[in-house]
Amino acid sequence: MQTFNYHIKKWEKDILSDPPLIILWKHYSQVVLEFQSQPHLGNLNINSINLCLRMKLQKVKEEIALLVDKKKKFPQPIQLNILEKENLNLKQEQTTLLKLLNSVPTHDIKTNHVAKLDKIRKELGKVAAISMNLSQKQLSQKQQEEQKDQPHLLGRYQKSQSEVEVMKSQISQNKSTEIRKLNSNTIKPTQKLHQTIQKSSQFKQQQEVHQAAVADISYTFQESKQRIDSQILNTSQIATIQGYFEQIGKPSFSASLLYRATRDGFGAINFHRKCDNKGPTLTIIKTLSDHIIGGYTNEQWDGSRECKPSYDGWLFTIAHPHPFKRKKEIEQGIWCYPVQGPFFGELGDIAIMDYSNIYNDSWVHGGGNSYEYGGVHLLKGKGPIHFKTKEIEVYEILYQ
């Protein structure tokens, strides 16, 4: 019994000597990736969801490190950078871990570790979905708070306007009074004029301050976030797309959905009805095997049966961090055929055929290579590959 009491006291001492985060990590780190948090999102507040995401991302980071170096020993005390960071950007952290995961070499690790790699990738996808849910909750909470503040803001606005009108009236009266005094007083006219100008300047400054306050209130009411409203991409993948635009030097843009195949139809006629003559567009394609590829063109789609250079265009596979830019020496950037969907490249670097969800006749890398891939294959294969599509989205791109 004395031995048992000794171990109990030692255990209590060890536990109580640890900081709260270390205690939390020691108790839940082994099971956090197995915890299915989606069914409980409705019952959790924002702080609880945030903590759950941080725990999962911390565990993913640890698992990736172990895959990269099996001999690595984590230092003591445990380093919990993700959990301890005060202002953690979840989207940025997911993107960083995804890039780190994509850089893990698979040719020299064991089969069971490849399976573990896939499990970690799926877990990152789940974290992205939960993160999107968290963002929606936070946005909803912010909107509710803004709605509560609207009467107060409106009151401030009305009060500011009233004060401006009162000040205008006072300045007008002061000007009239000063003019009368200038005509009747023995005080030097230049001195009185200087005082009038000074008061007018003060009024102007105060008016500018009020106008700035009014503009700030108006911005609060009118502010809106531009986002890619995709049913194909998760949060981290949307961040990857935004990264492509940053890499080509066009970070400020808005994306408006023109066409969604499951909504508008997979036929070429459906695509052209929604997307022709709309200017620059971004096409996102999800294959039946869940590969996500696509392309951007600065040209507009139409039924002209002609090719267009689209020199500012680029293609992508979402698994690769960089876009594949145009080869300037090849003129064919896109082809516009009324009986085909989006067709990129001279001979079909990406070619989407009529009813691509039914027929296995769409393809990648058909030849010609109008884009620079640097040895990367869009579908992680070799040579031309045919496929079916599960979803296609096309967005109109506007630059700010």
Image (cartoon, grey):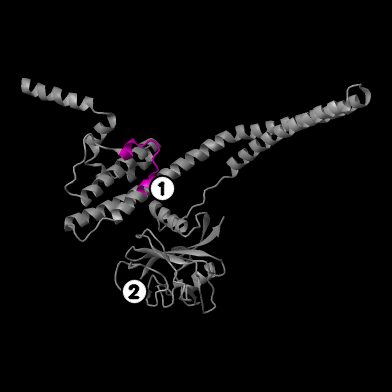
Instruction: Depth check: give the residue in front, 182 or 39.
Output: 182
Residue 190 appears left or right of 156: right
Check the image and report above or below for 139 versus 267.
above
Which residue in the structure is indicated by mark 2? 386
Measured Cα–Cα span from mark 2 to mark 1: 33 Å
Instruction: Depth check: give the residue in front, 179 or 1.
Output: 179
Three-letter amino acid code of the residue under disc 2: His
**Residue shown at 30%/52% (left/top)?**
100
User: Is residue 215 shown to the viewer in this render?
Assistant: yes
- Residue ranking furthest to the right: 184
Residue 203 appears left or right of 357: right
Q: Secondary structure at mark 2?
A: strand
Three-letter amino acid code of the residue under disc 1: Met
Residue 146: image x %, image y %?
A: 55, 37
Upstream in sequence: badge 2 or badge 1: 1
Q: Is residue 110 magenta?
A: no
User: Is residue 169 shown to the viewer in this render?
Assistant: no
Which residue in the structure is indicated by mark 1? 132
Q: Quadrant of the N terminus?
A: top left
**Residue shown at 30%/66% (left/top)?**
380
Residue 60: image x %, image y %?
A: 27, 46
Q: Main secondary structure of the magenta part?
A: helix
Q: Secondary structure at mark 1?
A: helix
Residue 62 appears left or right of 329: left
Q: Which residues are magenta?
A: 81-94
Q: Quadrant of residue 24?
A: top left
**Residue shown at 16%/57% (left/top)?**
110
Check the image and report above or below for 108 versus 196.
below
How many discs mark residues in the rendered view? Answer: 2
